[in-house]
Image (cartoon, grey):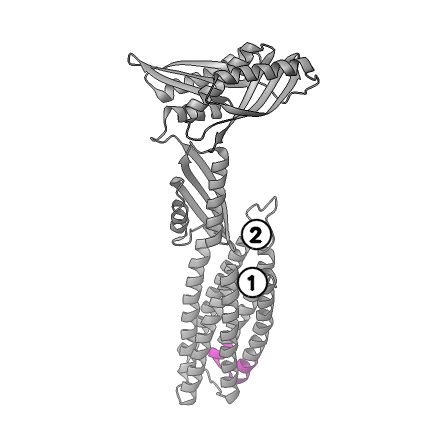
Amino acid sequence: MTYENEKEKVTLQSVFTSAAITILKLIVGIVTGSIAMLSEATHSGIDLVSTVLTFYAVRIGDKPADKEHQFGHGKVESVSALIETGLLFATSGLVLFEALKNIILGSHHVQVAWYSFVIMGISIIVDYFRSRALGVVAEETGSQAMKADALNFRSDMYSSSFVIVGLILVSLGLPIADALASIGISIFIIFAALRLLKQTFDILVDTAPEGLEENIIELTKKIPEVVDVVQARVRPVGNTIFADMTVHVSRKHSLDKIREIKELIVKRIEKSIPEIDLNLNIVPLNLDDETIVDQIRIAGQNHSLTVHDISIHNRKDKRYISFDVEIESKTPLGKAHNEVQKLENVLVREIGGSPEILIHIEPLYEERQIIEKPTPEELKKVEGAIKTASTQIKSLTGIHDVDVAKHHNKLIVTLHCYADENMTLELAHRANSELDRSIRRIYPLVERVTIHTEPRIE
């Protein structure tokens, strides 16, 4: 059974129970003339109204969010609890008025009957079990209206006990005890109403549950990639906790890594606090551990530019930086130059020291439609060029998986080769570049050579 159905079932049972208890107390109060009993009947009547309100509040409050109520209908339960609080104060006022009137006039006669004790005993037992049932479901679902009802019925148990004590004292020859019991009942009702009012008011003014914000921050900071939590706000709406949080991470992380960090934070918090609805904002920061290469790559990424072949060197207290950027091949030169100029301006500000920056623009080709087929003679010449070039570069061996494509009378070559597994990437890249240049020099019809170097394991 779902929480929603369980809540409706328990509150509906409470409605019928309240109706039965109210009728019994009213009958006994009229027959015996007990002010305390009639006060309890009035109290139970108010409880009946409250449980009916709770039933409808639960049904409305569990409706999903819609266009007009984007945070759901959970506060309907808090409004219901607020109305119940007002009814409790009205009940206590009525009971207190009747009790004081009878003390002052001193003319009230109470008939003590055995069934009065039976009715009050049954009332205490019933209030205990339905308070417990409502409390359990309220804790499971976070229902404010059901918490109000559970608190109400717990106070009923004590007020019913006052009635029993008052009846016993009346039977022992102290008539005023009935009115005094009514005053005791009104005091209990007032205290119950005050507790309920505070809880309801906290919900309505979005008071954060104690310790929840700290718990969320602590869970988030346990993730190594999180630099800082700069903002965390929580507010309860019905049985849902809405939270907004802003987290700082290093901007060196890729977009995929930042998305992974975000998913990890949300998953960890939702596991610890299932009722939470978290809105998480990740802000990448420039941290002190960034190198110049990091800054160049990140700046290029922020401008949607692919950066490669970064070279940095210092000469006579001057820093020289050069690198390549790829821009879509059909972009007008003026527009491409403006994009690169923006990137250069950002880097001058970030790096500082007025560096000399040279940016080489390369055309980035989209997927090409190969509509020409290399001739046998062209394939033979490519094979010869590769063979000749490879004899000049001893560090690369075992050329294999050669593929040749033709586009607009130009040849595009891809190949695989082997190099020593202990060779550094720098040396491997230099060898690849030499092989590329050598092949294109030997056979100029080759426009582009892509080389994949694999480690040669002895």
Residue 314: name its quadrant: top left
Name the foreground residue: 237 vs 259: 259
Q: In which quarter of the image is residue 62?
A: bottom right
Question: Mark 1 sits on what residue?
Answer: 54
Residue beneath label 2, please? 73
Residue type, numbered disc 1: Thr
Q: Which of 350 and 59 is in front in this view?
A: 350
In the picture, measured across the screen, residue 103 lies left or right of residue 334, that is left
**Place of residue 21 in the rendered image (x, y in percent of width and height, measured from the top left):** 56, 76
Main SS category, magenta section: helix
Disc count in the image? Answer: 2
Q: Which residue is drawn at 60% across and 72% down?
A: 16
Q: Residue at x 46, y 67 (%)?
A: 151
Asked where in the image residue 181 lies, by quadrant, the reply is bottom left
Q: How crowded is mark 2: few (under 14 residues within 10 Å), some or many (20 or more)?
A: many
Q: Position of residue 438 (x, y in %)?
A: 52, 13
Q: Where is residue 343 in the image (x, y as percent from the top left)?
A: 45, 18
- Image quarter hosting the N terminus: bottom right
First in residue order: circle 2 vs circle 1: 1
**Residue closest to the eye, 303 or 42:** 303
Q: How far apart are marks 2 and 1 (CA)?
A: 14 Å
Up/down of 9 relative to 199, above or below: below
Range of magenta residues: 27-38
Residue 385 shown left or right of residue 423 in the figure: right
Q: In this view, does 66 lie above or below 347?
A: below
Q: Is residue 351 left or right of residue 276?
A: left
Decide if residue 336 is in sight here: no
Does residue 128 appear anywhere in the picture? yes
Report helix, strand or loop for mark 2.
loop
